[in-house]
Amino acid sequence: MLSPKFERLLALIQKEWLQVFRDPSALLVAFVLPIIMLFIFGFGLSFDAKHVKIGIALEDRGSSARAFWNTFDATEYFDAAFYGNRSDAEQALADGDVRAVIIVPNDFSETLERGEAPSAQALIDGTEANLSVIVEAYALGAYAKFLTRERMERGSSAIAPAAGIINVETQMRYNESRMTRNSLVPGSIVLILAMIGTLLTTLVVAREWERGTMEATLATAVGKFEMILGKLIPYFLLGLGAATLCAVVAKYAFHVPFRGSLTAYYLTASVFLLAATGQGLLISTVCRDQTIASSIALLSSFLPNFIFSGVLFEIDAMPLVLRALSYLFPARYYASSLQTIFMVGDAWTFLVKNMAAIGALASILLVATVVKTRSRLE
Amino acid sequence: MFESIKRVLLLIRKELTSTMSDPVGRVVLFIPPVVQFIMFSFAISQEVVNTRVAILNQDVGVEGASLMKSFMVEPVFKEIVNVTSYRELDSALENQRVIAAIVIPQDFSRRVHSPGETPTIQVTLDGRRANGAGALGGYVQQIAARFGATPKIETSSERGLIVRRWFNPNAIARVAFMPGLVCIIMTTVGMIVSATSIARERELGSFEQLVVSPLSPLEIVIGKAASAVALATISAIVILLLVVFGFGTPLLGPLWLFMLSTALYLTAIICVGLFISSISTTQQQATLGLFLFMPPAIMLSGFATPVENMPEWLQFLTIPNPVRWELIVLKGLLTRGASVRSIAICLVPLALVAATTFSCAAFMFKRRME
């Protein structure tokens, strides 16, 4: 026979389960939101810049200047538009019509004829910080390519080379196809599980505190631990369900490699979900009000997970205080674990270290919840 | 007609007083925006700095050592980890102790000094770091090019392609992300004010009172939308003042353009919120509905990565996304000083989206009330 404690726990889980399945909004978050998020990270976000719109202002109408323009237009990185003068091109840059302007001065062909490397100017829109670095590298590359070709055509070594003396062989390890999608899609799973674990739990439990049904349940034979487990287990399982969905969609719809094992995948997901649901339970136990609880969940879960996961933003570039703070958020460890499981494989030393960190944070959150629940009732 | 306007104004007044007198309402309206703004403005950066890189130098000659030295002085790198074997290199990379590993092969010095041969170095980047790895690869290339160029070209640096970065010459991430931040915060405030408003009244029971009042459904929607727009505009102004005086980023375009686009944008966003609110029966549903709309809309706006990096069909699909247009307006006004004409063009899609979402909210609301 089952012990009465266990039976009560099962009844609580069953009750919670029925509640989830009767409210379409919770199911939307558990199963539709993951697909939307994966879709966004798979298609909508990308660091791969191609066909960047640039403007070329030709002040020199010679054939060499035109050849220079063609070099830019011919690469898949740029779509080059022609501007008759410098000020029109600069206005287009200010209006955001183009991301960069290349100005070819009127002595361009002449300098080249003299056998010197001609100068040209590149104005880059610095408001797209990341894009501007890439555009700069592409532009310098295109210029070097143009010079090399001119030298070959003229058969002279008179034109001093500007770049490309050291050959740099670049290899993108773990992501041979160089698709940022392979790293962004696993990274988005952090946000999905955090939303299910923290946001959903916060909303549900805060609502029960607000309405007083939490106290009503606790007035019955149900103990505090059973109560907490009865809330934790259903959302934990819902999270694991969403994690399964994410892995399937990532692998079969987005063709992200899955090089690790399912054991590693589910182990890390479980530890992270414990931390996420623990956080949700704690927030909702501390503040009864749904509106405040959801605002806090948004501030302490969605945004930090978005920023501190390091998926889209660089943790290394943050000020020291924030870098230190990032160690307190499970997302930091989970995002790199997920990327490792998908792209590298079972690198156990790395994974175990990260899991231990998440586990420590999870136990702090859960212990705090137990303490808080007890003090709330006294 | 006159009576109707009077009723709407009364409803707006009631809405404003009830929100401002409610401590919860005040907290939701002003604390999260300020916290977000401060946190985001320091945290958000895609700049590649303070990185750790491993170098395996197999070259015993002078050139290899001097190349290493030129890597060491680069501000991009915080630490150069010297490794002695490929095994050590692989493990540093796998455990994310370093983001990239550079190998200087043993014939490097010899090749530098023999004409006709090109010295080669290998760079292995951690592909897990989508943003960092790509940018770092570019930096290594630039450093190598500079190293190669120094002894050979005596002419001044005014030769070749001279690159200037406009609008943000020092590539400060905070400047680049400022317009996006303003946009996100306005969106969050607008959505929170509107999405829970009707659902909250329904849950608290005060909704029935509104229904039996002489207000028509259309008047209720107008009143709710207008008061939410007013509240969100106040917090938008607070944020603008913070940007201009706190961070010293001047408003480069006319103020009226900022206000007009903000009002249009907030109307569009708030009507989406009212629509979500009118189809949900509880606050919980409204909040979750908001979460289904807001993160996708923000992420598909060009905030994190540029819109032009998306596949073309997706760029087309984001045309009805109001966040995308507001972001163009704010970038133009706050960072580039774009021409009035180019900004005014974005007001057209914003106005169309606002009109559409308003009609949807009014329609849904009318159906729910009957």
Image: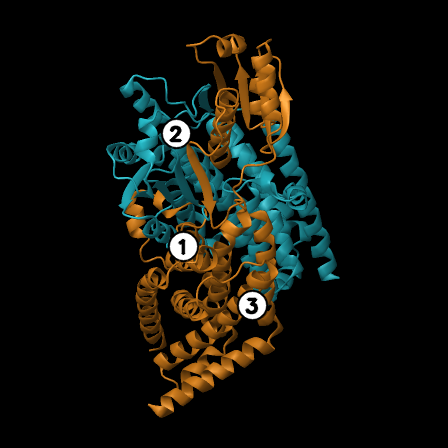
Q: As shown in the figure, which amino acid type bears the numbered disc 1? A: Ala
Q: Which shade of the palette goes to chain B?
A: orange
User: Mark 2, mark 1: which one is toward the viewer?
Assistant: 2
Q: Which residue is mark 2?
A: A141
Residue B223 picture quarter:
bottom left
Q: Nearer the viewer, residue B99 or B151?
A: B151
Chain that appears cyan: A
The verdict on a common chain for dots 2 and 1 is no
Secondary structure category for the residue under label 1: helix
Q: Is residue A354 above or below residue B289?
A: above
Q: Which mark is residue A238?
A: none
* Residue B101: image location, x then y, percent: 55, 22
Residue named by callout 3:
B238
Between A229 and A189, the residue placed more toward the observer is A189
Tell me the residue at 48%/57% (across/down).
Answer: B184
Q: Secondary structure at mark 3?
A: helix
Q: Which residue is mark 1?
A: B297
Neighbourhood count class around disc 2 (C-alpha, 10 Å): few under 14, some 14–19, many 20 upward: some
* Colour logic: by chain
